[in-house]
Image: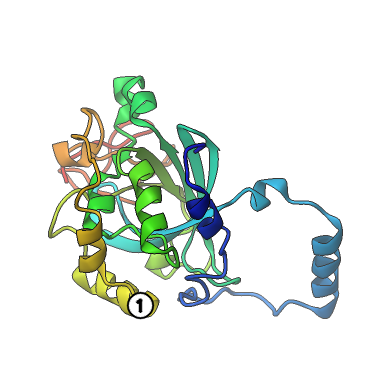
Amino acid sequence: MRRLTLALVAALTLSACGANNSPPQAPIPGQKTSAGLKTLEAGATLIQSRPPVEAISTYLDGFHFYSGDKNGQMEAHHYVTVLNEEVMQAVIYDGNTKDARLMGVEYIISERLFNALPPEEKKLWHSHQYEVKSGSLVAPGLPAAADKALMSRIVNTYGKTWHTWHTDRDKTLPLGIPALMMGFTGEGQLDPTLLAERDRRMDIDTPAVKRQREDLPAHPVLPGANAWERGEVIQLRRVNGSGEHGRGDTGHFTGAEQVRGKE
């Protein structure tokens, strides 16, 4: 993102803003961290370098749902690394405190790169236009001008998201298989209670954010994205047994690796 303004770059370095207000909800089984392990951790922190982690520059908060189950909604805290002008990657947590659980990953690409994907690959990706324009996707702690500059770079991108720890379903360990996630594309889809709780906790006025972004240039969504809107449910399944994160017309999954049914 070479064209980001100096003000935006400076704002993105304010990592303390908009954090430590969303702890994870599910407990983790296991004994408390021992003094010895804490000492090893502290020593490693001082001695070892972590370039991929240190490259994370941006914190985004939004919402996902399971492909094939729009009622399976959850808040997702994204910590984003910019790889180049057209590709970003994010690690996703269920909170923004130091004990948050790593829920999954999201890859974010430009319109141009998405448009060049094969048709079957496009079905795995979702658009970000509505998330940005509606104000449901936010960058907590950023000043309004920096937020708008950042969102102008995200509004026309596409994301592919896999969740590996389904903490919204009260799983205390990363059980089961990865799930393909989707993003919301229109009014009335996101649970208003979920949004209101996020806004209360983070002191965000989503309607005001939406108004601030009204003039962002959002392009029409390219064909192939948001496959769930066309009734195509795609999820992984076990080699033996049923899938875990969606449902087909008959209540069971078919196919070797992917599941397709109606929303």
Q: Who is closer to the viewer here, 58 or 183? A: 58
Tag 1: amino acid? Asp
Judged from the image, the secondary structure of the residue bearing numbered disc 1 is: loop
Q: Residue at x 20, y 39 (%)?
A: 261
The image quadrant of residue 170 is: bottom left
Q: Which residue is mark 1?
A: 203
Classify residue 114 by image quadrant.
top left
Q: Is residue 249 left or right of residue 26?
A: left
> Height in image: 226 above or below 103?
above
Image x and y of residue 115, in percent: 31, 23
Q: Is residue 155 above or below residue 100?
A: above
At a point 51% along the width and 71% down the height, the residue shown is 19
The front one of 237 and 190 is: 190
Q: Is residue 244 visible?
A: no
Q: Rate crowding at label 1 as few (under 14), some (14 to 19) or many (20 or more) other CA atoms within 10 Å.
A: few
Q: Is residue 20 above or below residue 103?
A: below
- Residue lying at the far front in this picture: please name it: 6
Quadrant position of residue 98: bottom right
**Which residue is the extreme one toward the left?**
188
**In the rendering, at what x and y percent does residue 182 appear?**
30, 47
Of 218 and 241, which appears nearest the observer?
218
